[in-house]
């Protein structure tokens, strides 16, 4: 049978590879790590569909702000109101 002829060859190959078992294990672990990093990297940086991007960009409406509200917000921001705290200036823990 062909299997009987194959067994001695496999045993001799196993003995020869046994000398390099730590190297083979290390290369296998490094290979799996590189493969995993490549898969993760390809998922995190997908290819951009330029046509869909342009279409979505055209569908965005123009944003208009109420000028009076903007002026009011800027005026209130510039008032710089001082608040007198009831706590001592160096106090950091409000539960003491």
Image (cartoon, rainbow, N blue to C red):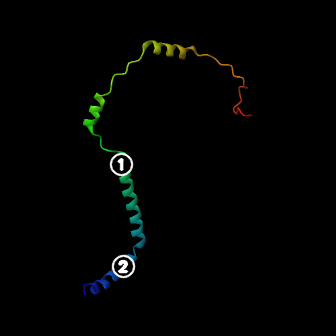
Q: Which residue is mark 1?
A: 43
Read off the residue under disc 2: 14
CA–CA distance in space, label 2 to label 1:
38 Å
Q: Quadrant of the C terminus?
A: top right
Residue at left offset 36%, top offset 79% = 14
Determine the image quadrant of residue 68: top left
Mark whose residue sits in front, 2 or 1: 1
Q: Compared to 57, does 4 lie above or below?
A: below
From the viewer's perspective, is 96 left or right of 74? right
Q: Viewer-proximal residue, 59 or 95?
A: 59
Residue 43 position (above or below residue 62): below
How would you rate the neighbour count of disc 2 (Cα within 10 Å): few for under 14, some for 14-19, many for 20 or more?
few
Q: Tell me residue 79's x, y (percent).
A: 57, 14
In percent of the image, x 27 and y 32: which residue is there? 55
Say what secondary structure mark 1 lies in: helix
Residue 83, image x, y percentages: 65, 19
Judging depth in this view, the residue of 59 and 96 nearest the camera is 59
Mark 1 residue crowding within 10 angstroms, few (<14) / some (14–19) / many (20+): few
Residue at 39% of width from left, 65% of height from top? 28
Q: Is residue 19 left or right of residue 86?
A: left
The answer to whether the residues at label 2 and label 1 have Cβ atoms under 8 Å apart is no
In x, y percent, where is residue 20? 39, 73
Quadrant of residue 12 within the rendered picture = bottom left
Q: Tell me if residue 36 comes above or below residue 12 in the rendering.
A: above
Q: Residue furthest right?
A: 96
Q: Quadrant of the N terminus?
A: bottom left
Which SS class for mark 2?
Answer: helix
Residue drawn at the location 40% of the way across and 61% of the way down: 30
Marks 2 and 1, the one that precedes in the sequence: 2
Residue 6: numbered disc: none
């Amino acid at each position: 049978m062909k299997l009987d002829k194959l067994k001695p060859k496999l045993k001799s190959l196993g003995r020869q590879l046994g000398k390099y078992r730590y190297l083979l294990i290390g290369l296998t672990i490094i290979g799996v790590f590189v493969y995993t990093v490549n898969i993760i990297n390809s998922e995190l940086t997908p290819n951009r569909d330029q046509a869909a991007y342009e279409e979505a960009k055209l569908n965005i409406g123009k944003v208009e702000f109420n000028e009076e509200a903007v002026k009011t917000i800027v005026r209130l921001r510039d008032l710089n109101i001082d608040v007198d705290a009831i706590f001592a200036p160096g106090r950091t823990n409000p539960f003491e």
